Image: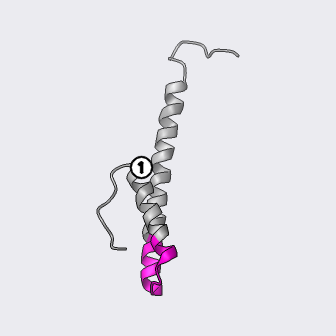
Amino acid sequence: MPKSKSPSSFAERIQMLQALVSHLEEADLPLDQSLKEFEEGIQLVRDAQEELATAEQKVNELLQPPIGQPAEQD
């Protein structure tokens, strides 16, 4: 599977990762090619994890009460 442009969204990363996994499972690739594709997949996973962590941090910030306002009690 040839390396294509860098994905610009989380969804594109997941699609590319799924395509890489399918290609690795279905193809009878030489070891060096398999390793290159595996490395590309690992980078996609790391990029997606970073994007998720950023989104989680943003959500947590949004859920914080405004400054000077006490947190709501359940």
Asked if the magenta segment contains residue 36, the reply would be yes
Q: Position of residue 2 (x, y in %)?
A: 33, 73
What color scheme is it?
one colour
Vertical comparison of 14 with 23: above or below: above
Task: Report the amino acid beneath label 1.
Answer: Phe
Q: Quadrant of the C terminus?
A: top right
The range drawn in magenta is: 23-39
Vertical comparison of 24 with 42: above or below: below
Q: In terms of secondary structure, where does tag 1 sit?
A: helix
Asked if the magenta segment contains residue 38, the reply would be yes
Question: Which residue is at a point 45% across and 55% down the rendered structure image?
Answer: 14
Badge 1 density bin: few <14, some 14–19, many ≥20, Cα 10 Å:
some
Closest to the observer: 48 or 12? 12
Q: Is residue 49 left or right of residue 16?
A: right
Vertical comparison of 37 with 5: above or below: below
Q: Quadrant of residue 17?
A: bottom left
Question: Which residue is at a point 50% across and 32% down the rendered structure image?
Answer: 59
Q: Residue furthest right?
A: 74
Q: Quadrant of the N terminus?
A: bottom left
How many numbered marks are there? 1
Closest to the observer: 56 or 68? 56
- Name the residue tied to disc 1: 10
Q: Position of residue 27 (x, y in %)?
A: 46, 79
Q: Magenta residues: mostly which secondary structure?
A: helix
Q: Position of residue 18 (x, y in %)?
A: 47, 62
